[in-house]
Image: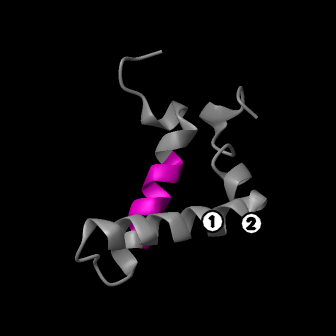
Amino acid sequence: MPSYAPEYNSDEYLNGHLKRTLAAIPHAKTVKELEKNTRSFMKKLQRNPEKVMSYFENENLKYAA
């Protein structure tokens, strides 16, 4: 694998989704608020296994599914 290959790493898809979601809501003014928003995102994601599985749909990630 190349030294940097985000398309081969499902975590990068999660990180991108988190960043886009947090950018779409009012910006956190404190670290606590950012933590709250991040935890809220992750709890919603836990209840959505279809979304989690979608991180593995890229052709480069078929080995991990």
Look at 73% across and 50% down and name the residue there: 53
Query: For the residue labelled by badge 1, is the local secondary structure a helix, a strand or a loop?
Result: helix
Name the residue at the left extreme: 29
The three-letter amino acid code for the residue at tag 2 is Arg
Point 77% across, 60% down: residue: 50
- Decide: few, some or many residues near mark 1? Use Cα within 10 Å; few <14, some 14-19, many ≥20: few
Q: Which residue is mark 2?
A: 47
| Looking at the image, residue 3 lies above or below residue 65 | above
State left or right for residue 8 relative to residue 23. right
Q: Secondary structure at mark 2?
A: loop
In the displayed structure, 62 sits above or below 11; it is above
Say the numbered circle drawn on residue 22: none
Kindly check if marks 2 and 1 are in contact, taking CB atoms under 8 A apart as contact: yes
Q: Amino acid at mark 1?
A: Lys
Magenta-drawn stretch contains 63: no
| Along the viewing direction, whichever of 65 and 18 lies nearer the viewer | 18
Q: Which residues are magenta?
A: 13-21
The quarter of the picture where residue 60 lies is top right
Residue 19 lies, in percent from the top left, at: 39, 62
Q: For the point 65% across and 37% down, which residue is it?
A: 59
Q: Which residue is mark 1?
A: 43
Q: Give coordinates of residue 4: x percent, y percent.
A: 36, 25
Task: Provide the major secondary structure of the magenta segment.
Answer: helix
Give the answer, above or below, for where 10 lies relative to 17.
Answer: above
In the displayed structure, 64 sits above or below 2; it is below
Among all residues in the image, which is located at the extreme front?
32
Q: Is residue 30 left or right of residue 65?
A: left
Callout 2: 10 Å neighbours few (<14), some, many (20+)? few
